[in-house]
Image (cartoon, grey):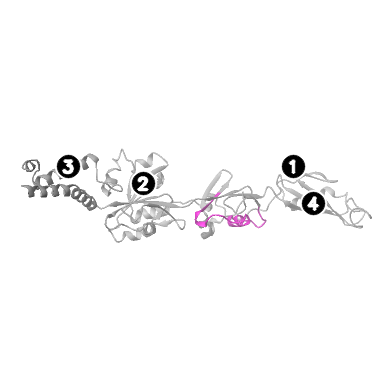
Amino acid sequence: MTGFPRILTSRRGLLLGASLLVVGSLSACGSLPTSGPTTANVESQAGEADLSRYEIIDLTPDVLNRIGRWPQPSFSGRFGDYRPAPTPVIGIGDSVSVTIWEAGSGGLFTAPAGGLLSSGSKSVGIPEQVVSPDGQITIPYAGRIQVANKTTKEVQQIIVDKLAGKAIEPQALVTIPRPASTTVTVTGEVSTVGGGRIPLGVRGDRVLDVISSAGGVRSPVHETFVRLTRGNKTAVVALQKIIVDPAENVYLRPGDILTLVREPQTFTIFGASSRQAQVPFDTVGITLAEALAKSGGLNDIQADAGGIFIFRFEPSALVRSIRPDSVLARSGALVPVVYRLNLRQAENFFIAKQFAVNNHDILFISNAPSTELVKFLSILSTVTSPALTAASVGTQFR
């Protein structure tokens, strides 16, 4: 055993060698094991002014106000229509029913005794007709009558005028038992399977009226979004917002299309939190404070309270309003943005209480710098402990 001490170095030498080995290995790997970038990494990797990868924006009261003033999807803002629907008119494809009365017997429409109608009847119902593509229907003794884009009252007067001098003081009643041109199409997550066409009432129907007529929604309210298409305009608003804000419950127009879409709302949390997960919302829009609480809060052993980050894409116009000199905001419609909040400052908890987390946002809590040192020392201890043990054994053999 006399050769063993020559091979085995001193404890100090073993410790130094093992340490150099660990440092060299970590240097080769680039970094210690980690759940994500540190605060310094996020800052340095944003890039230079002319080679920016994303914008880092500190959350301040001014930034919060600018975000809060940014227009959100809105039916009232998109369509700007608070009035009830106009008086409905007859349209192509509508089914029209006409009944004609005469003041005395012996007229054009008076049923003779023993006829299909009772003796002395002074009225007759014209079989229901569908308005033809040219916008007309046929009335006996009156011929073809243009009814498209006219109200029932106007058509009644036209029939009376056409029959004047032929019938005995004629009167007419026009109804639309099955309107096709004054309907709204409802589809998507409605209780009526496949949706359908809902006729609009004379008084006017709002969004919630039509959804109710279709049987209501199948999906949870906070996961349901309503897409309204009118002509070449489209807007999407959360059903919960329509329920809460009466201004969003706009009147609908004939030909509108309502599509109810189910879209579960979630955000993803990474880093030094008590939970790494995709977290669902319980309502449309939650605050940053609520999101942190839902994910279990900051891990007080690892977390850097000054490095709370929210990753998302923002409209370039919004980014320019916050940072006019942004290079990224000049290049496209959406800009990658990283919002940063320092929760070491107590007043920033009020900002966390007001900042809204959007669907598909990524929340990242960076590790504190001391965490990397603790990891390094832990790895160093793991590697050097066997060497120290061997050195101790070797000393006993000397």
Q: Element type at marker 2?
A: strand
Whether label 1 touches label 4, CB < 8 Å:
no
Residue type at tag 1: Ser
Residue drawn at x 39%, y 47% as measured from the top left = 312
**Distance CA(mark 4)–CA(mark 2):** 64 Å
Q: Position of residue 139 (x, y in %)?
A: 82, 46
Q: Element type at marker 1?
A: loop
Which circle's residue, 4 or 2, is located before the other in the chain? 4
Which circle's residue, 3 or 2, is located before the other in the chain? 3
**Distance CA(mark 1)–CA(mark 4):** 15 Å
Residue type at tag 4: Val
Tell me if I can see residue 77 in this picture: no
Please give the count of numbered marks on the rendered protein.
4
**Distance CA(mark 1)–CA(mark 3):** 90 Å
Pointer 1: residues within 10 angstroms few (<14), some, or many (20+)? some
Tell me if I can see residue 138 in this picture: yes
Residue bearing mark 2 = 337
Residue drawn at x 84%, y 49% as measured from the top left = 163
Is residue 200 located in the magenta-colored stretch of the structure?
yes
Whether label 4 touches label 2, CB < 8 Å:
no
Whether label 3 touches label 2, CB < 8 Å:
no
Which circle's residue, 4 or 3, is located before the other in the chain? 3
Is residue 377 located in the magenta-colored stretch of the structure?
no
Q: Which mark is residue 98?
A: 4
In the image: residue 55, left or right of residue 383: right
Residue segment shown in magenta: 199-227
Q: Which mark is residue 181?
A: none
Q: Is residue 238 above or below residue 316?
A: below
Single out the mark in the foreground, 4 or 3.
Answer: 3
Q: Which mark is residue 21?
A: 3
Single out the mark in the foreground, 1 or 2.
Answer: 2
Q: Nearer the viewer, residue 24 or 326?
A: 24
